[in-house]
Amino acid sequence: MKKAAILLVEDDHNLGPLLRNYLNLKDYDTTLATDGAQGLKSFKKGRFSLCILDVMMPEIDGFTLSKEIRVIDPDVPVIFLTAKNLKEDVLEGFKSGADDYMTKPFSMEELVYRIEAILRRSVKRESDTKQQVYLLGEFTFDTMKQLLIRGEQTTKLTTKESELLELLCSHRNEVLERNFALKAIWSDDNYFNARSMDVYITKLRKYLRDDPSIEILNIHGKGYKLLS
C-alpha cells in the first residue's frame, strides 16, 4: 500500500526534524518545510494526503497558509500544531480550514491517532463521492483504469489526460475555469502549464471527435466547457 504523504510545516528546528522522523517511522512519507513560504512551495510541487501546520511562522503564518492551500486543494485535511491555545485562536484555526487543532506541548502518539482518524474519514469520503465511470455519448470513460472506450476501440490515457477529462466530466455542461484546472492538475497556473493544458485539450478533442455529440468548447477569458 502506498504511504500517505504528509506535509509538515514547522519552524522549530528541534521539533520539526524530530516530528518528521517520528512520522516516517510510523510509515508516513513526510516532507518538512521550515516556514510558511517554503511550505506553500512544497505543497505546489507535491501531492499530499494531509498537512500539519505550525501557526506562528515567518513569511506566511499557518492560518494564511491553510487558506492558500485550500485554494489549490479544497479537500486536503489540515491539522494545526500551535502554542496558541486561547479560544479565539482555536476558532480562527477552524475558520481557516482546520480539521483538527492541537496545542503544544502535545503527545506524538496522540497526533498519530488523530492523523489516522482523519485519513480514514478522508478515504471514506473520497470513495463515497468519487465517480469512477462516466458515460460520454458513445464513449465510456473509466477514471480508475484511465481508459476511454468506444465499442471495440479502447484508448489508454496518460495520467494528465485522464485527470483533465475527469475534471471536465465532473463539470459537464458547466464552465471549468482554467486557473482551477491548472492548480488542480499542475499545481501552478503559470504560462508554460497553461500552454501544456491547451495541448492536452487538443488531444482530448482528437480522442472524442468520432462522436459529434461531444464538444469541448473554449469559453473566452474563463476556461472550457464539456458538452455531452
Image (cartoon, grey):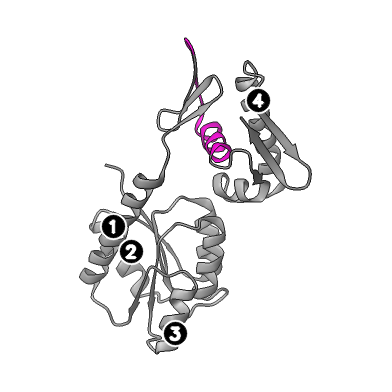
Distance from label 3 to label 4 (Cα)?
49 Å
Q: Residues within 10 Å of mark 2 (few under 14, many from 20)?
A: many
Q: Is residue 96 above or below residue 88?
A: above
Residue 27 in the image, given as x and y percentages of width and height: 25, 53
Q: Is residue 120 above or below residue 181?
A: below
Find out whether the residues at labels 4 and 1 contact each other: C-beta distance under 8 Å.
no
Distance from label 2 to label 1 (Cα)?
6 Å
Instruction: Select label 4 or label 2 by which is in front.
Output: 4
Q: Which residue is mark 2?
A: 20
Judging from the image, what secondary structure is the residue with disc 4 in? helix
Q: Amino acid at mark 3?
A: Asp
Report whether residue 4 is seen. Answer: no
Distance from label 4 to label 2 (Cα)?
44 Å
Q: Which residue is mark 4?
A: 205
Q: Which of the two labelled residues, at mark 3 and mark 4, occupies the earlier sequence position? A: 3
Is 157 colored magenta in this rendering? yes
Q: Which residue is mark 3?
A: 89
Q: Amino acid at mark 4?
A: Arg
Find out whether the residues at labels 2 and 1 contact each other: C-beta distance under 8 Å.
yes
